[in-house]
């Protein structure tokens, strides 16, 4: 606890000095995202040392991962609103790589547990408990965000702590659900392919594909592709009802994920993956020499 307070104190001193001297609100956002990731990293290490039972430890790790994901993405909203989608995409690309390298077995995403149930790798009870842990982490982190925004260290945070939020859905609900579902399906197909092919820089490639799909869907549904993330950031916001939110961001994304499980098993896709894995010559594959 004392370490976290010390880190927060140093962070505040740095951002206040930077903001006063250079008037760089983007630096303020960057440092806050780094702080959030650092605190989550410390919490994760503490849980790994203190909790011995594997499943209970995983539940804590899921909650921490969801809190880190949603906390960073709250600030990414500020980045997108003030510095454009291209800047937002750069941040998201880097963060996705960081999360892939540091979360371990945690995913902070409910439909990955549904996939495990379908494939016989998990049971419904554990899937529900993991989802509950993720929702808890994603919803509770808003108080942390609100406390930071209320400080109004940067002009980009003025009046943000308590303002009413608006939905990102810019198309009819059915279209929004299709956008979230199709993009989620493509993301999961890409992730499964990369996992099987294991090329060099697989994490960066996966991050690039995911970020590209987010940017493509940004002006339609917001491009969340994660029910917990969408709920933490946008549930209850003006622009759609909770039922409509659930249809787009829960039903749409989960349907896309489930469809990807069955699509990936199709002979045509399996044949393509096998042929790609056997390809010789200059390549990015991990078991090839350039």
Image (cartoon, grey):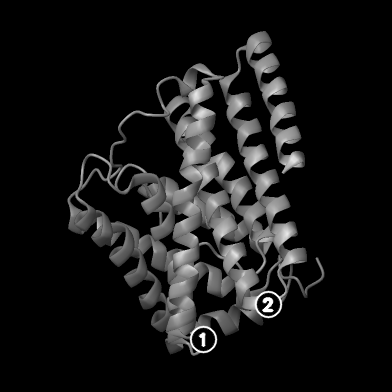
Looking at the picture, tell me which residue is in the foreground, 249 or 49. 49
Question: In the picture provided, is 19 more to the left or to the right than 117?
Answer: right
Instruction: Name the residue: 48% across, 87% down.
Output: 119
Q: Is residue 109 visible?
A: no
Q: Secondary structure at mark 2?
A: loop
Residue of label 2: 53
Q: Which mark is residue 51?
A: none
Instruction: Name the residue: 50% across, 28% down.
Output: 149
Residue 57 x/y as whole percent: 65, 70
Which quadrant of the rendered structure holds the N terminus?
top right
- The furthest residue to the front: 2
Q: Quadrant of residue 237?
A: top left
Q: Secondary structure at mark 1?
A: helix
Looking at the picture, tell me which residue is in the foreground, 56 or 156. 56
Instruction: Name the residue: 64% across, 79% down.
Output: 277
In the picture shown, does residue 29 fall above or below 107? above
Q: Count residues near mark 2 (Cα–Cα under 10 Å), then give few for <14, some for 14-19, many for 20+.
A: few
Check if mark 1's residue and mark 2's residue have beta carbons within 8 Å. no
Residue 37 x/y as whole percent: 65, 45
- The furthest residue to the right: 289
Q: In 3D space, how far apart are the residues under numbered discs 1 and 2 (Cα atoms)?
A: 40 Å
Q: Nearer the viewer, mark 1 or mark 2?
A: 2
Residue of label 1: 271
Question: In the picture provided, is 83 more to the left or to the right than 7?
Answer: left
Sequence order check: which comes first, mark 1 or mark 2? 2
């Amino acid at each position: 606890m004392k370490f976290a307070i010390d880190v927060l104190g140093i962070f505040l001193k740095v951002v206040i000095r930077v903001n006063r001297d250079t008037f760089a609100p983007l630096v303020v956002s960057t440092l806050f995202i780094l702080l959030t990731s650092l605190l989550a990293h410390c919490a994760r290490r503490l849980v790994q040392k203190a909790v011995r039972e594997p499943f209970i430890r995983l539940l804590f790790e899921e909650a921490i991962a969801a809190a880190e994901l949603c906390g960073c993405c709250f600030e990414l909203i500020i980045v997108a609103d003030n510095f454009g989608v291209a800047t937002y995409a750069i941040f998201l690309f880097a963060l996705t790589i960081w999360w892939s390298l540091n979360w371990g077995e945690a995913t902070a995403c409910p439909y990955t547990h549904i996939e495990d149930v379908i494939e016989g790798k998990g049971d419904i009870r554990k899937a529900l408990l993991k989802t509950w842990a993720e929702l808890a982490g994603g919803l509770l982190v808003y108080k942390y965000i609100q406390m930071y925004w209320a400080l109004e260290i940067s002009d980009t945070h003025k009046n943000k702590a308590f303002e009413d939020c608006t939905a990102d859905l810019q198309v009819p609900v059915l279209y929004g659900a299709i956008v979230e579902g199709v993009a989620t399906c493509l993301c999961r197909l890409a992730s499964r392919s990369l996992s099987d092919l294991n090329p060099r820089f697989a994490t960066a490639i996966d991050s690039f594909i995911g970020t590209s799909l987010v940017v493509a869907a940004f002006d339609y549904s917001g491009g969340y592709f994660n029910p917990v993330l969408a709920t933490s950031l946008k549930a209850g916001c003006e622009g759609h009802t909770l039922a409509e939110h659930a249809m787009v961001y829960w039903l749409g994304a989960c349907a896309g994920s489930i469809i990807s499980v069955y699509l990936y098993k199709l002979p045509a896709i399996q044949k393509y993956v096998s042929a790609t894995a056997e390809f010789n010559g200059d390549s990015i594959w991990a078991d090839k020499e350039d």
